[in-house]
Amino acid sequence: MGHLMITPDISHLPQHIYNFAKIKAKTYLDTATDNKGLGCLFFFLKPGLSKQWSYQYGPDTVNINYNVDTFDPKYMIITSVKHL
């Protein structure tokens, strides 16, 4: 089963930064399931997007590094269900 991990621990992030990062994740990530029906869930970056981004959000600099699976049509099927 796939998992989306946010590091550092979100309990240390200000709420407005967490909300900003979550919105970006919903925009930049897609999901897929395994094509054998085993119930696996994969998160992967949408095509053409960089794994690292840096944003200025008010007075804060937010650095996001997407360390997610690479979509492989040999094993995965894109889903339209968002799990973020």
Image (cartoon, rainbow, N blue to C red):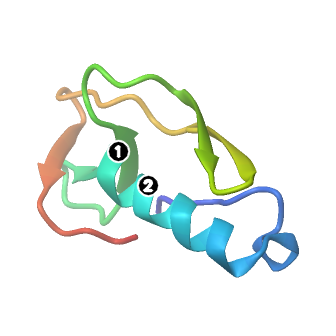
Checking the image for residue 61, the label placed there is: none
Q: Quadrant of residue 6?
A: bottom right
Q: Residues within 10 Å of mark 1 (few under 14, many from 20)?
A: some
- The Cα–Cα distance between marks 1 and 2, rounded to whole angstroms, is 5 Å
Q: How many marks?
A: 2
Q: Quadrant of residue 71?
A: top left
In the image, is residue 52 above or below residue 9? above
Q: Are marks 1 and 2 in contact (CB under 8 Å)?
A: yes
Residue type at mark 2 is: Ala
Q: 77 or 13: which is nearer to us?
A: 13
Give the percent coordinates (x, y) of residue 56: 62, 43
For the point 51% across and 39% down, the residue is: 68
Checking the image for residue 25, the label placed there is: 2
Give the percent coordinates (x, y) of residue 78: 15, 47
In the image, is residue 72 above or below residue 25? above
Left or right: where does residue 68 sit relative to residue 30? right
Give the percent coordinates (x, y) of residue 79: 14, 57
Q: 33 or 29: which is nearer to us?
A: 29
Q: Quadrant of residue 13?
A: bottom right
Residue hosting label 1: 28
Report if residue 29 is visible in the image: no
